[in-house]
Image (tube, helix red, strand yellow):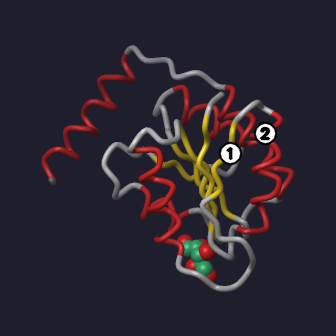
Amino acid sequence: MVKVAVGCDHGGFVLKESVVSTLKLLGAEVVDFGCFDESSVDYPAYGEKVARAVASGECECGVIMCGTGIGISIAANKVKGIRAAVVTNTYMAKLTKNHNNANIIALGGRVITPQEAEEIVKAWFTAEYEGGRHQRRLDMIAKIEEDRQ
Ligand code: RB5
């Protein structure tokens, strides 16, 4: 069973229930790193928790949510090995798996609806990484990461 890490701030909380139930319907085991209500919290903490769970191998991939998906993705992308993509439609969701092998997607609770989030999660989770020429580019990204350590 694929283990998926999920995390959000108060701005993304509106999407979490739909995201979690969609992942479960797709056969995933969900590890929920919070937050657990709409009280104001700081998105970097939740982006980091999910990113570390994925980078360590505890979880295979993750879904993070904040108001726009942007702040929490910036935080997650600071963790080595993470390719977190902000996604606003199913085309981006599919392509970011096909080409970028995104191991985390970031969604915006103030940008998309819970129903759109379900479709996006489904499109990303069921898509396949294509490898080939794309691997060369991912290796180049990893090299940039090595240089900054
Ligand atoms: C919180 O108000 C908001 O800034 C946050 O959810 C997110 O949109 C940041 O990128």
Residue 66 in the figure: left or right of residue 42: right
| Residues packed near mark 2 inside 10 Å, few (<14), some (14 to 19) or many (20 plus) | some
Instruction: Decide if ligand 1 comes within 8 Å of the CB at mark 2.
Output: no
Residue at 68% from the left image edge and 74% from the top image edge: 11
Q: Earlier along the polypeptide chain: callout 1 or callout 2?
A: 2
The image quadrant that residue 10 belongs to is: bottom right
Quadrant field for ligand 1: bottom right
Q: How many numbered callouts?
A: 2
Residue 118 in the figure: left or right of residue 4: right
* Image spot of residue 52 (x, y percent): 42, 53
Residue 18 in the figure: left or right of residue 73: right
Q: Which residue position is annotated with label 1?
A: 30
* Image spot of residue 53 (x, y percent): 47, 49
- In front of the other: 98 or 40: 40
* Image spot of residue 18 (x, y percent): 82, 53
Q: Which residue position is annotated with label 2?
A: 24
